[in-house]
Amino acid sequence: MLNPVIALLLQVQVPGVAEHRVTDIFTPLASPAAAEKNIAMLTIAITTAIFVVVGGLILFTIFRFRRRPGDDLHQEPPQVYGSNQIEAAWTIIPLLIVFILIGVSARVIAAVQNASPPKSTLHVTVIGHQWWWEVYYPDYGVRTANEIHIPANIDGQTATYLTLQSADVIHSFWVPQLSGKMDLIPNRNNYLWIDPKDPGVYVGNCAEYCGTQHAKMLLRVIAQTPADFNKWAADQRKPQEENAQAAGAKAAFESLSCISCHAVRGTSAAGRFGPDLTHLMTRQTLAAGIMVNNGRSLRDWVNDPQYPKPGCFMPSMKLTNQELDQVVAYLQSLN
Amino acid sequence: MATVDYPLDRPPVKDTEFSFSQALYSWVATVDHKRLGLMYIVSALLFFVVAGIMAAVIRLQLMFPENDLVGPATYNRLFTMHGTTMVFLVGMPMVAGFSNYLVPLMIGARDMAFPRLNAFGFWIFLFGGLLLYYSYIGGGGLQGAGSAPDVGWFAYAPLSEGAFSRGSATDYWALGVMVAGIGSIASAINVIATALCMRCPGMSLSRMPVFVWVMLIDSWLIVVALPPLTAGQIMLMLDRHLHANFFDTQAGGSAVLWQHIFWIFGHPEVYILIFPAFAILSEVIPVFSRKPLFGRPAMVGAVVAIGFISLGVWAHHMFAVGMTSWSNSFFAASTMFVGIPTGIKIFNWTATMYGGKLRLDTPLLFCCGFLLQFLVAGLTGIMLGVAPFDWQLHDTYFVVAHFHFTLLLGLVFGLFAGIYYWYPKAFGRMYNEKLGKLHFWLFCIGANLTFIPLHFAGMLGMPRRIYTYPAGRGWEGWNMVSTVGVFFQAAGILFFLWTMVRSAFVGEPAGDDPWDGWTLEWATSSPPPEYNFEKLPVVRSSRPLWDLKHPHDPDWKFE
């Protein structure tokens, strides 16, 4: 049942980077998620206590007052119509609990939503597309896809502010260990901030149903030390280097309709519909996180994207084997 | 004694001598509230079986990671049709069916206030449902680009707009649901008029059975909440066909506007759906505990309070759309306030059982299941109401588990209680108690097995509406157990259908009043004649039959 590409993905370990494959909301690794976890624990404690008390009362009542074989069926139990004191008690006690929860909620809502950015803040624009994420760094002029590189909050003064937009339908940004979700809505800017302390890969998914391939719209946030992040950003900023060996492959790529949808900065490929392919080979995964990025899976993907991701907007271009070789060779040269 | 003068060309015929076509005609042309009520409930059960089969396929698909039983397109249609069917073609006709069958009987009336409107309501609901299902054939449209709708039951714009939902699938969704909604509104107006104007002599509003009270408030809620949905669907159709651009973001429309319009309907809607269960429990628990409903005025007041508060909580479905912190706090607060009257109801039902002599037959078993499971649903609802917690839980399987605890382990348990309780009244024969209990235990175990694990899958980060998921995130075990539960549920439903069909023919004759009940429907024969009561009853308290059976200790002395 296990799709081979996914099985591959399970084994993937990027050297030197801890990979958090968990999406558990109770092991938060950034401030918003931690605040949400704390209020979650409080809520769970309160509701569990209510469940034990009320559920216990219900069960006790059922067992204690069930009709037994020897009971006189003609003898009706005492007819009790109600009691205002008891009604008042079980109105006021829940009211007090609710007031506590409302107060705590309002505080956490304000703390997360209205937090002011710290000194060094990276701004990233994330644009949802039907079934992939476009990532734009306005301060660096860098455009990439599906993997969001950010500096880790090692000095306690670093955060990343995300401006969330959508190019088509509603999506939702959700990396559970970093923060709760925020929708990406067309014609609207939404904001979210994250500040993971540990460098590493944090995984998530699109969390708003967005059409056929909603399930395979995975998301990776890659937190790096500030030095690593700056190096990455500087590398990404450079135009794509010309690789003499791949000149023929490049010509083949540019002669095919790949370039109608994909861009490679510094070449004639300037399509905007699909992910920007500049520095493609620096990415860990393909097709919004569903397969590891290497020569074999690239070839499989370009050959027929409809097999691993049926319904996605990249068609099988029916390339000949030779064209396929050239395209994959060119893509592999995009370091 | 005068002789009866029959017209010569139309000899009198007895029911049993009807030919098939005459029988069919008598059902199609009927305006009798009992027949229409049964037709509502039977159609709802048919849709329930269809939607249940869809749910089973969904669960089988999710049993393993990377499963490929169905593809993404089919899967998305399945969950859309499952949700739409359960809400609009099972939940809503159950409201109409139960209130149609029982309200006139309980208030001592001969029929509903508007019998023809009643028949119109049923038929337009049924054809609305068939129109929705015709999408499997006609949904392709001229472009051949669709089948059944695949936009989810809340059809978020702009996914439902022409650019992203091609073909006619979404048009069938909007029209089918809109047409079925006309039936619901017609039936709601009828219930309001009946309950307010047709009560028998002596039945003041304060003596009206709690079932009728709850259905009256439910009907008001339908009249207030359903038109926004209809308006939204008309706007969506205008967008799709005349480029009105209300929600078309590519032309400057607003995606959030649709969410507000939909949830202004959608949140009261879930209370509309759960109210019949409240109504049924408020009748079954007292009779099976042999005690009057504890705190009757508080129970009615709580339903009124839920009705009002439910009109102001809608945006708790939208904590993740980026509202201001003030809006989020407001809707978190209003959502939690709904918990208070709901809690009052659970406490009062428990207090009704406390000190009683509980007859643990199938109807009460389902009520007990409801109480415990609805308690869980209420508490997970509080968790979702805490907005920061909801930012994590929103659109995950935790939400799926929560609303299935409300609607399947809550509402459907309540409906089963009601079906078993009034079955002997409707058919004059008793259901099979053994099969009933078997149904209860299988369904109870199965439903819990299916939906308890999904809470944990959600907290481990599993989003809803995904047709497949990668292995290695800790979701596999929960999903496996969840799917196993489906087999128990299906077995339970088979026993249910078996006893329902079989007992109608060979069940033991039930008599007029098998439960020693207290409301007026038990004062007439089983099944009741077309005119309900030979002589309209006169009542002096909220338990008229208790007064008759206990002349030395009547309720009216205390009320």
Image (cartoon, grey):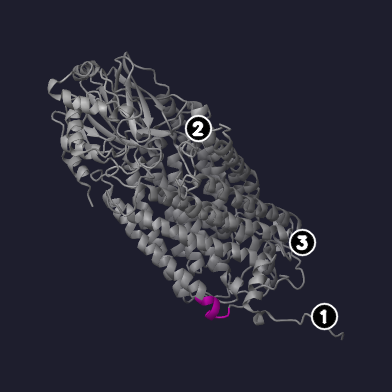
Residue most extreme to the right: B2
Residue carrying label 1: B7
Residue carrying label 3: B202
* Residue B418 part of the magenta segment: no
Question: Can residue B299 be seen here?
Answer: yes
Question: Can residue B546 be seen here?
Answer: no
Task: Say what amino acid the circle numbered 3 marks.
Answer: Gly
Task: Say what amino acid the circle numbered 2 marks.
Answer: Ala
Residue carrying label 2: B255
Task: Say what amino acid the circle numbered 1 marks.
Answer: Pro
Chain at numbered mark 2: B
Whether label 3 touches label 2, CB < 8 Å? no
Marker disc for residue B129: none
Q: CA distance from mark 1 to mark 2?
A: 65 Å
Name the magenta segment's main secondary structure.
helix
Magenta-drawn segment: B502-509
Chain at numbered mark 3: B
Determine whether the residue tagged by mark 1 lies in a helix, strand or loop.
loop
N-terminal-most mark, 1 or 2: 1
